[in-house]
Amino acid sequence: MTNRFDGIIFDIDGTVARGKKILPGVLDTLEELRRRDIHFAFFTNDNSNTISFWVDRLAGMGIEARPEEVLTSALIAAEATAQLHSTKKILPVGNVGLIEALKAKNLTLLDFEEADQAEVVVMGKDNNFDQARLNIVCQAIWNGAEFLATNYDPKVPTATGFVPASGPMVKAVAYATGQEPLVTGKPSHWSGEMAMKILGATPERGAVIGDQLGTDIAMGNNAGLFSILVLTGVTTQEQADAAQDEMKPDLVLPDINQLIKWLDKRF
């Protein structure tokens, strides 16, 4: 039997887990994918935390993932920055996850005191973002720096509700400068393309599996991946049926436990 895919991107919450609890049957599916030598990675739009944080968090759910099997929007932003601006001076605006990812690409990173030298601004969520930092970032862009951002997510869930995510900070800079950033996280095509590059697969042999039309499925469609919606998260079958073309999944499954059965039946 020939595998349909060489690389698969899994969303996390609503796809392989709900909150901090793994969904039933996920481990069996992942084990079978490993047996078939189908590479996969877990992709989160989080850009604040490090890869090791997510490896530990997945382990806490019972999923043993290697560091190379975890992708964050910070990692994708670093890949895109290295591809587009490898020799330029970068002003990073974000937390430890973004800084770590950019450092790993051996890019020239500036401190805020050196922001007047910035040729590129790469922005994620910054816990120290304030009026003074807003001014520094805007001045860099007004002085000609390119503008990249990890994502436009408006909020992230917490145990007690929500907190603002990267989007409000990025929007503030975009609004003040009149310059929209190149957004590399979900649902941009950069996410899918860079993820496949990291997995060593071509888009034609890649898939994304997630529970959200506007992020996971749209990303897959934008990058030319095979997009699979699972109904274990926020999206219903009715919503999938009514989705616009750019968010229409190629396949809908009740859960990822049906993936292997579908592969065996289809191929």
Image: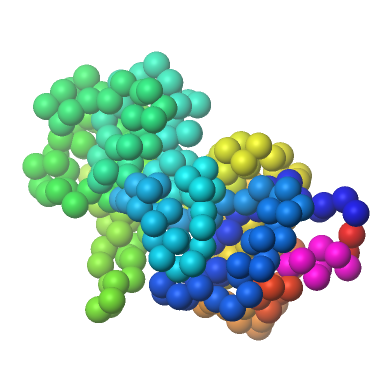
Asked whether, in this view, residue 162 is left or right of residue 43, the answer is left
Quarter of the figure with residue 87: top left
Q: Residue at x 50, y 26 (%)?
A: 83
Residue 263 can be seen in this image? yes
Q: Is residue 5 above or below residue 159?
A: above
The x, y position of residue 27, in whole percent, is 61, 67
Quarter of the figure with residue 190: top right
- Residue most extreme to the top: 87
Q: Is residue 172 above or below residue 28?
A: above
Quarter of the figure with residue 161: bottom left
Q: Residue at x 15, y 35 (%)?
A: 136
- So how many labels did they put on this image? 0
The x, y position of residue 153, in whole percent, is 38, 59
Asked whether, in this view, residue 23 is left or right of residue 223, the answer is left
Q: Check residue 248 for magenta coloring.
A: no
Query: Which portion, as a residue range, is magenta?
Result: 259-265
The x, y position of residue 267, in whole percent, is 89, 59
Decide which of 104, 190 is in the foreground and name it. Answer: 104
Q: How is the image coloured?
A: rainbow
Q: Is residue 245 above or below residue 190?
A: below
The x, y position of residue 69, in whole percent, is 54, 48
Decide which of 67, 159 is in the foreground and name it. Answer: 67
Q: Check residue 264 for magenta coloring.
A: yes
Q: Residue at x 88, y 68 (%)?
A: 265
